[in-house]
């Protein structure tokens, strides 16, 4: 019980620190939302005037109150779950903007993370069991090769060849232009088609982490006495590999997987950017370039909250997975 | 199973997925533009930046969030070419200055709003009074120039506070909104206008987060001259490379995108229909802070101007698409008719190290051991520019190396645009890369950059004249030009400004900023071109309306 109480206290303190940082960090960026909005016009070659700046300033309703008043409003808004209106999308609330983007990211990155975890871990088990042999080195070298691709570069490569040159996949977006998200079968198929390239990019570049983690844990575990004992008892090698070695080797990977799931909500700014995927990664990029404080704050809050919850859940679950943690605390 | 066979699996899965959906993914961009109706068909224009989805907003007074289609829905009195300031009439049939402070627009009769209500001069008066009531809507500062607007018969009269003849262009391009709709809107500043009622040639048909479609307005006063029956605007991607690939793939009839090696990446992909026109749309220059020494010394500025090789800078910055700029501030060839013929070499300054060193010597700077030394040691300069403007960055790198060769220590500072804006507007920079002009009207170009009325004290932000130029002679010449109603007086005053610009170097103008028009003649012809330069190929301002009303079915 004391263990849980301590974790809950820690969770609350960390949450407050994170919330406060979310407020401070965006405001440390030099320049104002008004300048950022005018920058979009300027980059298109539109001559900017003082009158235009004054008008945009009035339209955005950029804050004029003191930073402490803003912080008070911010805390109150979080407590009541009201995030206000963003500068980038003045016609809809921040909550709605994020609500529209979040499912795209959760499904894409979530499914890819689970996929990469399962495949990567199995490959790691396989390589670890056959350590030092051809199977091991081909998996290891392959994983090193693919793991070394920077995601944005692999993304551009796949985009150019598979989408532009061969025309197998659409160039951009989460669904075809002109359609509105709905639950019809044709729309889901369309969305699936649009998700193949970003999913492939994410999967290829994250797979190798799981492979290495699992392979190295396997090799450590295989040196343990109980594995030797199991082998000496004449158990089938598959039983030894999966039930005795892999089960124990899996523990650190499960922790990492929990944390990865927490990070899923953060999406992938680079990959979503390359494919213009309508997820939160893209939204964060937009919020930063527009100096959109309300949107940025709400996004960072969602990210930190999901990360903290993931850590909290892993903390709570860990004693069940590994009894040694229970006795240590 | 090793990784190789896994990769093979993934590829096979990918192939299957592609096979099943190849049709859907391909019809997205091109399928929409294959209508065979005799009336005109569909015009596909590379649309607004989607990020990656669009938010519906057709409020014509919100420059930073309105969608480009708004320009086809709300017609202004006239459109003004950003090439040379020539007018194309829409809701007005013409204008005249009855005195330098009295502008009379004659309103076209027989025009209807897209909901069938008759359009009247009262709507024009209502629109301008709306801008007066809600200053946040007055992005062009109309009410900083005029004091009253009134209608009488078919005429609408604007009374100016002080003579400003060229400001007629700004009044002309103010979108006109219907009184019977907008008078009952409680807050027009935040109004997103999702059911726009306008007088333009198109009305909104459908809106989806990734694309919107306009359809021809049957009630448009000149409907028989409008070729496309609908106009589709697919949202642009977040990533510029994706946008370039889409253009290259031929998804649009009209796009506005910088493409490297445009012949190979665009024209050659369909030489019979794909064409481009990259006219200059403004001037890129090195803005020196005139409140700081030694930049406030005209000899020093002349030295900088003479030390730079503008052809090389233009080559590095924009692939050689653009020419070195005339330092008179006149954009060539667009505004050729305004150029003072007495300026040597059309005002283009060539690199001349000897003359540069002589100018620096007059400013008290001489070369010592490869360094340009002055009263306070070596000449230094930090050039600030926004990191996302890659052409400016390439230019700045070349400037830095060329100035380095003559012994000036140059640093480059490349923050985000918002910080660049903050630094330049506050006047706390040494040097900045910036844009000059581009309105098509010499007075506006000169006034925004040189009028000392804008030169706020350092730390007080100003967007215009941020280099803080202050010259009584230039102010007088600007006032004369603002009040000039006859062409010869206008030419004379413009000549004076060109000469002063050339001699006093308030800004070291370098090369022209490009306007990147890419067209396909597959469905429509009549695009602006070097041989018919009726406006810039920009699809994000009233040039859009001018171009679309020029098109004829191919």
Image (cartoon, coloured by chain):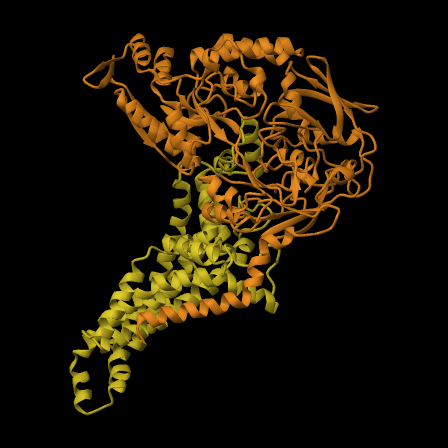
In the image shown, does A51 or B58 lie closer to the viewer? Answer: B58
Give the left or right position of residue B473, taking residue A154 as reference.
right
- Please, is residue A88 above or below residue A253 in the view? above
Residue B528's image quarter?
top right
| Rendering colour (chain B) | orange
Task: Using the image as rendered, state which of residue B449 and residue A22 is in the foreground.
Answer: B449
Residue A202 visible? The answer is yes
| Left or right of residue A135, residue B275 in this image | right
| Colour chain A is painted in | yellow
Residue A296's x, y, as percent? 46, 48
Q: Where B554 falls versus A180 (above or below)?
A: above
Tell whether B235 sits left or right of B384. Answer: right
Quadrant where the C terminus of chain B sits is top right
The single residue placed furthest to the front in the displayed view is: B272
**Residue B109 pos. (x, y %):** 82, 30
Q: Nearer the viewer, residue B2 or B205?
A: B2
Q: Is residue B308 above or below residue B231?
A: above
The spot of residue A195 in percent (x, y) is 48, 62
**Residue A329 visible in this rendered orientation of the protein:** no
Q: Is B6 on the left or on the right of A170, as rendered?
A: left
């Amino acid at each position: 019980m004391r263990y849980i109480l301590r974790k809950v206290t820690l969770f609350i303190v960390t949450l407050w620190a994170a919330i406060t940082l979310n407020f401070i960090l965006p405001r440390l960026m030099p320049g104002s939302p008004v300048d950022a909005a005018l920058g979009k016009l300027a980059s298109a070659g539109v001559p900017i005037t003082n009158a235009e700046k004054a008008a945009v300033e009035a339209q955005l309703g950029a804050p004029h109150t003191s930073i402490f008043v803003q912080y008070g409003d911010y805390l109150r808004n979080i407590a009541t779950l009201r995030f206000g209106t963003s500068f980038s999308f003045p016609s809809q609330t921040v909550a709605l903007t994020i609500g529209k983007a979040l499912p795209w990211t959760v499904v894409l990155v979530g499914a890819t993370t689970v996929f990469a975890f399962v495949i990567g871990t199995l490959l790691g088990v396989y390589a670890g069991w056959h350590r030092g042999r051809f199977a091991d080195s081909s998996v290891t070298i392959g994983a090193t090769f693919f793991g070394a691709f920077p995601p944005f570069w692999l993304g551009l490569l796949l985009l150019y060849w598979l989408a532009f040159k061969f025309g197998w996949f659409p160039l951009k977006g989460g669904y075809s232009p002109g359609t509105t998200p709905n639950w019809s079968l044709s729309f889901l198929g369309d969305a699936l088609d649009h998700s193949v390239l970003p999913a492939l990019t994410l999967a290829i570049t994250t797979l190798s982490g799981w492979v290495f983690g699992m392979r190295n844990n396997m090799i450590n575990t295989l040196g343990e006495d109980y594995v030797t004992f199991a082998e000496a008892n004449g158990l089938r090698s598959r039983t030894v590999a999966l039930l005795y070695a892999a089960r124990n080797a899996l523990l650190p990977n499960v922790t990492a997987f929990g944390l990865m799931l927490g990070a899923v909500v953060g999406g992938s700014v680079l990959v979503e950017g390359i494919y213009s995927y309508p997820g939160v990664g893209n939204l964060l990029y937009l919020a930063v370039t527009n100096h959109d404080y309300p949107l940025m704050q709400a996004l960072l809050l969602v990210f930190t909250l999901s990360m903290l919850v993931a850590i909290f859940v892993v903390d709570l679950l860990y004693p069940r997975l590994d009894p040694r943690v229970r006795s240590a605390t | 199973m090793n990784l190789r066979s896994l990769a093979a699996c993934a590829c096979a899965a990918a192939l299957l997925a592609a096979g099943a959906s190849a049709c859907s993914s391909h019809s997205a961009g091109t399928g929409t533009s294959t209508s065979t109706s005799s009336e005109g068909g569909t015009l596909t224009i590379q649309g607004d930046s989607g990020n990656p989805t669009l938010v519906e907003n057709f409020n014509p007074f919100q420059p930073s969030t309105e969608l480009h289609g708004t320009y086809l829905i709300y017609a202004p009195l006239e459109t003004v070419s950003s090439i040379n300031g020539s007018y194309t009439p829409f809701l007005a049939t013409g204008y005249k200055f009855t005195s330098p402070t009295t502008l009379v627009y004659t309103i076209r009769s027989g025009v209807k709003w897209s909901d069938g209500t008759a359009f009247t001069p009262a709507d024009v008066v209502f629109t301008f009074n709306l801008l007066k009531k809600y200053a946040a809507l007055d992005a062009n500062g109309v009410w900083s120039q005029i004091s009253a607007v009134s209608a009488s018969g078919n005429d609408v009269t604007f009374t100016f506070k002080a003579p400003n003849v060229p400001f007629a262009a700004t009044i002309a391009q103010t979108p006109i909104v219907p009184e019977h709709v907008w008078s009952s809107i409680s807050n027009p500043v935040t109004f997103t206008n999702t059911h726009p009622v306008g007088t333009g040639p198109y009305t909104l048909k459908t809106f989806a987060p990734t694309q919107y479609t306009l359809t021809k307005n049957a009630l448009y006063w000149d409907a028989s001259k409008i070729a496309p029956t609908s106009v589709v605007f697919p949202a642009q991607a977040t990533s510029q490379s994706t946008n370039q690939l889409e253009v290259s793939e031929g998804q649009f009839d009209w796009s506005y995108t910088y493409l490297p090696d445009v012949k190979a990446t665009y024209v050659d992909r369909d030489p019979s229909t794909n064409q481009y026109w990259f006219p200059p749309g403004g001037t890129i220059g090195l803005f020196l802070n005139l409140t700081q020494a030694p930049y406030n010394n005209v000899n020093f500025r002349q030295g900088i101007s003479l030390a730079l090789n503008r052809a090389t800078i233009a080559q590095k910055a924009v692939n050689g698409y653009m020419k070195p700029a005339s330092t008179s501030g006149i954009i060539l060839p667009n505004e050729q008719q305004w150029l003072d013929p007495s300026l040597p070499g059309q005002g283009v300054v060539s690199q001349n190290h000897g003359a540069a060193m002589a100018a620096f010597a007059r400013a008290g700077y001489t070369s010592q051991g490869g360094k340009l030394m002055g009263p306070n040691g070596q000449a230094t300069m930090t050039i600030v520019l926004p990191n996302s403007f890659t052409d400016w960055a390439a230019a700045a790198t070349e400037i830095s190396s060329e100035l380095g060769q003559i012994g000036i220590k140059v640093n480059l500072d490349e923050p985000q645009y918002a910080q660049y804006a903050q630094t330049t507007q506050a006047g706390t920079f040494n040097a900045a890369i910036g844009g000059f002009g581009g309105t098509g009207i010499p007075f506006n170009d000169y006034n925004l950059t040189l009028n000392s009325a804008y030169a706020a004290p350092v730390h007080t932000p100003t967007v215009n004249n941020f280099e803080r130029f202050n010259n009584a002679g230039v102010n007088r010449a600007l006032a004369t030009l603002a009040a000039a109603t006859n062409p010869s007086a206008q030419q004379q005053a413009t000549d004076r400004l060109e000469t002063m610009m050339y001699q006093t170097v308030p800004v070291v103008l370098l090369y022209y900023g490009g306007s990147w028009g890419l067209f396909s003649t597959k469905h429509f012809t009549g695009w602006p071109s070097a041989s018919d330069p009726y406006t810039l190929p920009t699809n994000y301002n009233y040039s859009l309306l001018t171009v679309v009303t020029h098109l004829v079915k191919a």
